[in-house]
Image (spheres, helix red, strand yellow):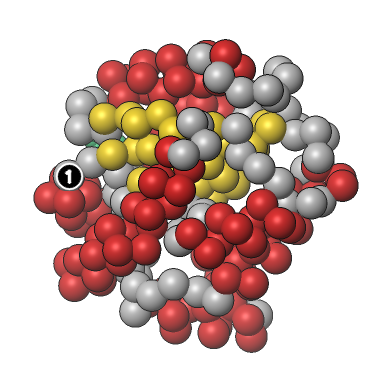
Amino acid sequence: MAEEIKNVKIIFVVGGPGSGKGTQCKKIVEKYGYTHLSSGDLLRAEVSCGSERGQQLQAIMEKGELLPSDTVLDMIKEAMIAKADVKCFLVDGYPRDVKQCEEFEKRIGKPCLLLYIDTKPETMLQRLLKRGETSGRADDNEATIKKRVDLYYKATEPVITFYESHGIVRKIDSEPPVEEVFSQVAEAIDGLCQGCKCST
Ligand code: ADP
Ligand code: MG
């Protein structure tokens, strides 16, 4: 456990690529003043600063594969400790598989809510192709998207099953328009402390 952040709440935001995690996190930040940490954004920042580590990461991300767990977790932990005086972290894009859940809990702490942003694979593909027109992201192309979606179902969905047994999963239907999705998200957050022992 990381001492510096032991009193900060942690919410995991889990969903496939293009499901709307970033979009919903932005709205949560506006309404609740929580702190958004996107593992993908942290990694892309490392890539764009051109470090040697960044170049290695880029080669893996372009192929749509998962990065070494230790590196990603190091970066998340550094970012959390740098902002240790916040109310609540929204951890978006991590954990990607069950092993990463275990590592995160060991090195950082336990989440008190998991927002499961659920969308159909066709919707993910459509949204990402559209995002790819302007995002400049090397992995927003059809072949890589399909690989990322497959990997999501294989590796990441078991994370949801893992946390269902802890009673902290709230499933959000992310097919409707952004505002409708957000009303489900807000309801889950408002109910947060009814089902867990954390303090607000
Ligand atoms: P993620 O962070 O999960 O990969 P994003 O939040 O970047 O996904 O969303 C992917 C794309 O889908 C973005 O272009 C976003 O504007 C769009 N999008 C997100 N949520 C919705 C929604 N509920 N309805 C329509 N488009 C959406
Ligand atoms: Mg995102």
Q: Looking at the picture, tell me which residue is in the foreground, 147 or 62.
A: 147
**Residue at image x 61%, y 39%?**
111
**Residue at image x 69%, y 24%?**
198
Position above or below: 16 against 166: below
Q: Residue 58, how many percent across, how many down?
A: 48, 78
Query: How many marks overall?
Result: 1
* 4 left or right of 134 in image: right
* 145 left or right of 37 in image: left
Q: Residue 193, how many percent across, how many down?
A: 61, 17
Quadrant of the image occupied by residue 123: top left
Structural crowding at the residue carrying mark 1, measured as other residues with C-alpha within 10 Å and reported as few (<14), some (14–19) or many (≥20)? few
Camera sees residue 38: yes
**Residue at image x 55%, y 83%?**
55
Quadrant of the image occupied by residue 171: top left
Position above or below: 176 against 16: above
Camera sees residue 49: no
Of all residues shown, which one is farthest toward the front?
Answer: 165
Q: Which amino acid, mark 1? A: Lys
Of all residues shown, which one is farthest toward the right?
Answer: 3
Ligand 1 within 8 Å of disc 1? The answer is: no
Q: Looking at the picture, tell me which residue is in the foreground, 116 or 162.
A: 162
Reading the image, the residue beneath label 1 is: 120
- Helix, strand or loop at label 1? It is loop
Q: Residue 133, how many percent across, how many down?
A: 24, 57
* 162 left or right of 72 in image: left
Report the quarter where the C terminus lies: top right
Q: Residue 124, how many percent across, how many down?
A: 21, 49
**Residue at image x 56%, y 45%?**
91
Q: Looking at the picture, tell me which residue is in the foreground, 120 or 44.
A: 120
